[in-house]
Amino acid sequence: MARRNAAPAGAARRTKPNAVESSAAAAPQRRELTIRPVRRGDLEAVIAIDAQVTGIEKRDYWRSIYRRYGESAAPGAQFLVAESAGEVVGFAIGEVRDWEFGAPPCGWVFAIDVRPDARLAGIGTRLLETICAGFRRAGVRKVRTMLASDNTLILSFFRSQGMMAGRFIPLEMDLEG
Ligand SMILES: CC(C)(COP(=O)(O)OP(=O)(O)OC[C@H]1O[C@@H](n2cnc3c(N)ncnc32)[C@H](O)[C@@H]1OP(=O)(O)O)[C@@H](O)C(=O)NCCC(=O)NCCS
């Protein structure tokens, strides 16, 4: 546990070879990895990965996310994909938000997904590192996210990157009628 918690989010933490350093003889996701801004042609792959992970296809939602974070992204907004062997194998989305919940400007990661057959090869780490680098370039020094309390996979991942429980807590209630 201590090994994973030492590095801050976005730091170059791994000592074992990650996807970009691995040889061409390895699995496809290990051959070469590019993290880059999303393009329109990536949308079908993003929709498919999300549908595979969540079990729900949300075509209209992803089109609107693409318009907002892909085509006409505001400064500080990022929609990144991970590409390996010509295929999109993961994505991450985030943006800098100013003074929401009374907090000074910070980066929010609100989606990160890696295709199940490409996991545990460092792709999620590379996506988070790249999005954090973008936040740093935008001038913020804090990154936040939110996750379902029963999603132990995503919790393990974010903890491994150095993220810890923050000073905000979520509240919710059902609305009648
Ligand atoms: C979380 C997720 C992005 C991780 O992607 P990944 O490419 O497999 O991550 P990495 O290979 O970079 O793993 C980094 C670290 O995360 C932790 N981790 C990743 N998968 C794990 C697992 N299945 N169990 C425990 N820890 C895990 C490990 O500490 C790992 O480091 P290690 O390989 O040195 O042990 C990916 O599993 C995923 O897309 N899950 C579904 C995400 C989801 O629920 N999205 C919806 C809400 S946004």
Image (cartoon, rainbow, N blue to C red):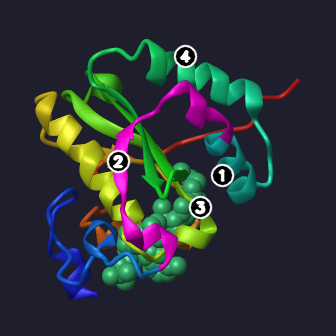
Which stretch is magenta?
27-44
Label 1, secondary structure: give it.
Answer: helix
Figure label count: 4
The reply to whether callout 3 and callout 4 are in contact (CB within 8 Å) is no
N-terminal label among 3 and 4? 4
Do we see residue 176 in this rendering? yes
Q: Quadrant of residue 11?
A: bottom left
Q: Residue visible at 39% across and 47% down?
A: 145
**Badge 4 is on which residue?**
67
The reply to whether callout 3 and callout 1 are in contact (CB within 8 Å) is yes
Picture coordinates of residue 1 (x, y %)?
28, 87
Indicate which disc residue 49 carries. 1
Q: Residue visible at 20% across and 85% down?
A: 3
Q: Distance between the residues labelled 4 and 1?
A: 18 Å
Q: In which quarter of the image is residue 156?
A: bottom left
Ligand 1: does it lie within 8 Å of the C-beta at label 3?
yes
**Badge 2 is on which residue?**
35
Picture coordinates of residue 12 (x, y %)?
14, 65
- Residue type at tag 1: Ile
**Badge 3 is on which residue?**
115
In this rendering, would 48 be left or right of 15? right
Q: Can you say whether 143 is above or below 161 in the image? A: above
